[in-house]
Amino acid sequence: MDTIVKKRIKQVIKGDQDAFGEIVEIYKNSVYQLCYRMLGNRHEAEDLAQEAFIRAYVNIQSFNQDLKFSTWLFRIATNLCIDRLRKKKPDYYLDAEVAGTEGLTMYSQISSDSPLPESEVESLELQETVQKEILKLPEKYRSAIVLKYMEDMSLNEISEILDLPLGTVKTRIHRGREALRQQLRYV
Amino acid sequence: MCPEQIIELIHDYLDEELNQEKEKTLREHLKSCKECETIFNELKKTEAFVKSISNMQAPPNFTANVLARLPKEKKKVWMQRWITNHPMLTAASVFIILMMGSLFSSWSQDQEFSVSKQKNLVIKNNTVIVPKGKTVKGDVVVHNGNVRIEGEVQGDVTVINGEKYLASAGHVTGQIEEVNQVFDWIWYHMKKTTQDAIGIFSQSETK
């Protein structure tokens, strides 16, 4: 796959948008997931994931072709998410948690048409719980944890994406993992 | 030694960064220490939970939405792709361009005075004269010159890049045509080609 990506990047550098479409297809799920796990909101996640791809396209000239494209792309996306989190004003979105309720989102207030089987409800509940706990992590631990466990990145890649020394990345993952353990141990 | 240093070992183990010797130390400790074992298992469970929710799909039309927000593509790239996607149309347009080119160049190169060879035609200073009382048989074609018809022409008269004078006594049985503009010239060529083609066709039919 790396050779395909390399080839497409060369075409994108020449300005071919169709080739870029293929790149988006390859990475859209992981970039979207990264943004969603970081921000906890589908609407914002889609917006920022799109923004990440657009920035990658516009700045493709500055991409060093000897490096891994995914690392570069994830770095753009992570930085966008961190910027957004820092600037974040309280906004109301459908999947934001409703104040004063535990794990209740606007989605759950819209009645669902088809009842879900019990096992699916359980796994959805687990998903929501895990997502909620990830969102409770301080942003510096959150990015490391999401990259490691959601995006399956190696510690070296994470250190490149976050532009941090390897030791710092390890510490952040250890702390993030420990915080999650405290919250998820009785699930 | 329990628990701070062991916790470190557990994390290093989870990061797959523990050498065999240290792993052995860890395993032995876990066997003897219930507390550390619980922490170890909880951490493994936490990892599994987090990994289990890691298969999100981007919303539908994601790629199309990204492409719609990109700055406009360079024309050159668009052209190149169009050419590779439509080879037949490209070949056809190249053919047409070459055809037009050859017609234009033959128009501009063809600046010399010439006239079809026929009996009774008199040539004077780039003017072809059909003398009074004489009859010219066949079509008369004059390039880059004028024609003055005082007698009779049994056929068509064509003047390319010139003028014709038809005297009152002059007579042409066929059509008289003047071609002066490039487009007239192309039109004339096309008409002639078709007529020739039809001529061949009808000839072979009569045979």
Image (tube, coloured by chain):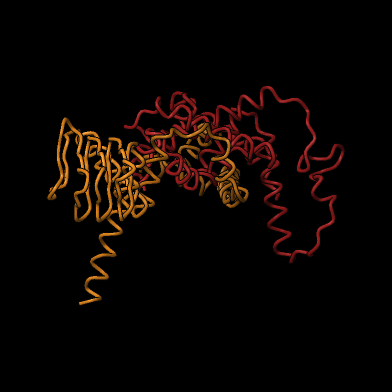
Chain colours: A red, B orange
Residue B110 percent coordinates (x, y): 20, 36
Q: Is residue A170 visible?
A: no
Towards the viewer: A116 or B148: B148
Res. B161 image quadrant: top left
Q: Is residue B6 left or right of residue A9?
A: right
Residue B86 coordinates in the image, percent (x, y) = 38, 52
Residue at image coords 72%, 58%:
A122
Pick the residue in front: B117 or B153.
B153
Residue closer to the observer: B174 or A153: B174
- Residue at point 16%, 47% (across, down): B116
Of residues B184 and B126, the one nearer the viewer is: B126
Say if residue B74 shows up in the picture.
Answer: yes
Residue at screen point 16% across, 39% down: B114
Tell me: A65 left or right of A55: left
Residue A115 in the image, given as x and y percentages of width and height: 79, 64
Q: Is residue B19 above or below residue B193?
A: above
Judged left or right of residue A97, residue A173 is left
Q: As displayed, is residue B130 above or below residue A90?
A: below
Farthest residue, direction right = A100
Q: How many marks?
A: 0
Q: Quadrant of residue B66?
A: top right
Q: Where is residue B77? Give x, y as percent.
A: 39, 37
